[in-house]
Amino acid sequence: MSVYNQYPNNQQQFSTRAIHAGQDADPSTGALNTPIFQTSTFVLDELGVNKGYQYARTHNPTRTALEQCIASLENAKYALASASGLSAAYTVTNLLSAGDHVIVGEDVYGGVYRLFEQVLTRYGLSFTYVNARNIEEIEQAINEKTRLVWIETPTNPLLRLADIRTIADLCHANGLRLAVDNTFATPYFQRPLELGADVIIHSTTKYLGGHSDVIGGAIVTSSDDLYERLQYHNNAVGAVPGPFDCFLVLRGLKTLKLRMREHERNAFAIAKFLESHPNVETVHYPGLATHPQHELAAKQMSGFGGMVSFVVKGGIDFAANTVSSTNLFQLAESLGGVKSLICHPATMTHKPIPKEIREHCGIVDGLIRLSPGIEEAEDLIADLDQALSGSPGNQQSLTNNGTDANSKLETRAAERALVQTR
Ligand code: P1T
């Protein structure tokens, strides 16, 4: 059998696999932990004979260990590690050809929207954005060019759900593939392939890595055909992670279950606190009985995840004031680390989406996204409580009117976008 992607032992429990799958002691030295194989190339035994590795863009043993572990956790046959969540998304779109059409759940991560709209439309792909909570909307968007349906569930940042099994059935009845971004739920809480999805993508930058110290991505499938084509493109395009980054994600996976339980516990406590706060208009958290898709969440997930978002009264001005006033919650993009983060999606993570589309989806200026870490819930709640104090109409804000606050945030975001394009 090839050294690549041996089908892991999926009979064992989740954490056992997180610690052991793909991670036997190193056969050449006995090292308990998978070493960081910091090498670009591998010496042949003789012409045409190698030890399973030839060139590190194609395969690297540290990466193989990570791929086997992620495949095992998703109950999948194969995983491919990628340089980032976006490169994983991009590699999946390499399955398509010019002229193909993709149906996308509308409130996806802003960077995915930017990849689709600003990059891939130039290559002749087209995208239709739908409310993926409504199966009829997906069905109506299918045309003879449609090849793929792309959903996030729960979504970033509104924590909306899509019914994976129902959508997978619709896709398969129409000869389409279903791709699910499982970054928010993680395989600890949701395994989309078991519900009929064809391919999963992850930003391993988030919960899988878990410590906000690495950028990475993964693609997961159980289809031999898809794996072969995805592996071909991963190598041909070359957006692969280095061995140290693979090591960091592999290290993070070992504690995924423990961390996800804590993230969820904190998210739950915070969501309940926010729900009864006088300055909060709406709370989005699938674990709350008031979440419109709470029942679906309970059915297709084994937990409700660690992310919470909420809309403050007072719009942009009070939101700007709140995100600038926390002490433990750090104002930053990204999510899924042990240290709590707070973010203003409209001017940060979802800035690439035009304002009218953002607002149509519900990503309003008063929306704040939280990624609670694994600090103590009572400290996190006290931090939010002091940040939310004051009156939404009359707070000491960054500026004294909402338009100014908005333009200040927009200017900062535009400056950042400029830096990013350099
Ligand atoms: O940042 P990267 O590893 O390339 O992952 C992209 C990505 C893909 N899918 C989802 C659901 C994501 O949330 C992300 C990245 N998101 C952020 C950086 C963020 O702050 O929302």
Image (spheres, grey):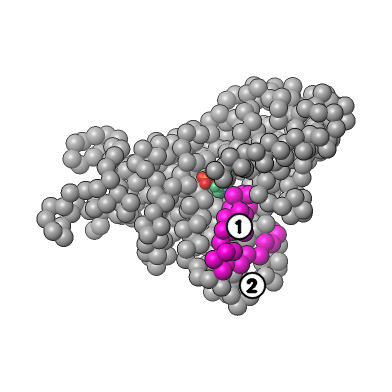
Q: Quadrant of residue 320?
A: top right
Q: In this view, does 117 lie to the left or right of 50?
A: right
Instruction: Indicate the quadrant containing the N terminus: top left, top right, bottom left or bottom right.
Output: bottom left
Report the residue that reaches farthest toward the front: 422
Q: Is residue 408 visible?
A: yes
Instruction: Indicate the quadrant containing the C terminus: top left, top right, bottom left or bottom right.
Output: top right
User: Does the magenta segment cover residue 215?
Assistant: no
Quarter of the displayed picture in which ligand 1 can be seen:
top right
Mark 2, secondary structure of its residue: loop
In the rendered structure, which disc, 1 or 2, sits on the residue that comes first in sequence? Answer: 1
In the image shown, does 166 or 53 lie closer to the viewer? 53
Residue at x 40% of width, y 36% of height = 248
- List the residue tagged with mark 2: 142
Dots 1, 2 in contact, CB < 8 A: no
Amino acid type of the residue tagged 2 in the rendering? Ile
Q: Quadrant of residue 401?
A: top right
Residue at x 24% of width, y 34% of height = 31
- List the residue tagged with mark 1: 118
Mark 1, secondary structure of its residue: helix
In the image shown, does 233 or 401 lie closer to the viewer? 401
